[in-house]
Image: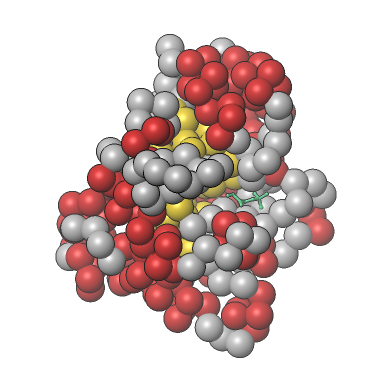
Amino acid sequence: MSGRKKLIFANWKMHFSVKQATAFAKKLSEKKIDEGVVVAVAPATISLSPVSETLAKCDIATIAQNGYHRDEGAFTGETSMPMLRGIAKFVLVGHSERRHVFNESNELIRAKMSAAVRSGIKPILCIGETLMEKEHYHTSTVISSQLEVGLADLTSDEVGDAVIAYEPVWALSNGKDFSKHKMPAPDDIKKAVDLIRGNIKELYGIDAASKVKILYGGSSNADNATAILSVNGLDGLLVGGASLGVATFWPMVEAAGRVYKDNLTDKK
Ligand code: 13P
């Protein structure tokens, strides 16, 4: 799949005060992004608006880390998808920390997916198996069912426009010392990517399957970015811990530029 842009998306999770997030965004906005690379960042909700203003004049988009499925009402503490309009281009839906720390069900995730699409925010559906599910050889079943339920209310065109992030829960980092973290080999990531595209082809047709963007997330960093980004069919990375500093994050953006360029050369 040469010629497709590489997406390097940063999930800052619950890090940075508003001031820190804005200052970090300012630093990123001064960087030059190579051809063929798309960069986006997901700050905490409170920083979304100032970060999006800071990035307004550069090519870095903003991602909301979460959004509620109801448009408005008595839902203390929640932010609706319509509220994100004009501030975030993307929204993470079903991140494993939402599924496992906040007990979000596949059904709630399904409702959030359609709320995002309805509001014109591109959803990034996060899926992936836990360690226990992997050890019981349930990886494919988990991927397929999370995908099927999460996308159930979307049309083929909407699925083609969406982003899927494969993030095996057991591979997520604590943001430091990546050498100690387990993660899937590029071949295993390729199997997951093929399974995701295969399922989407079956359910939504070949156009949606080839258009949909697929990211990998889980302990990705500057040392392994090139190998992962070279996985055929993978469109990019959703980076957690390594996205929290320019020195650890920007080499990944540069690696994406090199992989994009190499793919173009291979095609010639
Ligand atoms: P890490 O890159 O820190 O493993 O986190 C991945 C992730 O959860 C991105 O959403």
Residue drawn at x 76%, y 51% is 174
Quarter of the image where one finds residue 25? top right
Which quarter of the rendered picture does the C terminus lie within? top left
Identity of the residue drawn at 52% across and 63% down: 104
Colour mode of the rendering: secondary structure
Please state if 120 lies on the left or on the right of 255 as rendered: left
Q: Depth check: 220 or 16 in front? A: 16
Residue 126 lies, in percent from the top left, at 48, 57
Q: Nearer the viewer, residue 24 or 217?
A: 24
Please tell me which residue is depicted at 20% across the width and 65% down the height of the picture: 204
Question: In the displayed structure, would residue 69 be above or below residue 249?
Answer: below
Q: Position of residue 124 (x, y in %)?
A: 42, 49
Horizontal and vertical percent for residue 9?
A: 51, 39
Q: Is residue 188 visible?
A: yes
Q: Is residue 42 above or below residue 206?
A: above
Which of the 4 image quadrants contains residue 147?
bottom left
Residue at 48% x, 16% y is 53
Q: Nearer the viewer, residue 207 or 75?
A: 75
In the figure, is residue 210 to the left or right of 258? left
Q: Residue furthest front?
A: 74
Q: Visible in this render: residue 222? A: no
How many numbered circles does the render carry? 0
- Describe residue 209's horizontal placement relative to residue 97 as left or right: left
Taking depth in this image into account, of 85 and 216 the one nearest to the observer is 85
Q: Which quarter of the figure has residue 133?
A: bottom right
Indicate the position of residue 137 as horizontal and vertical percent values: 56, 85
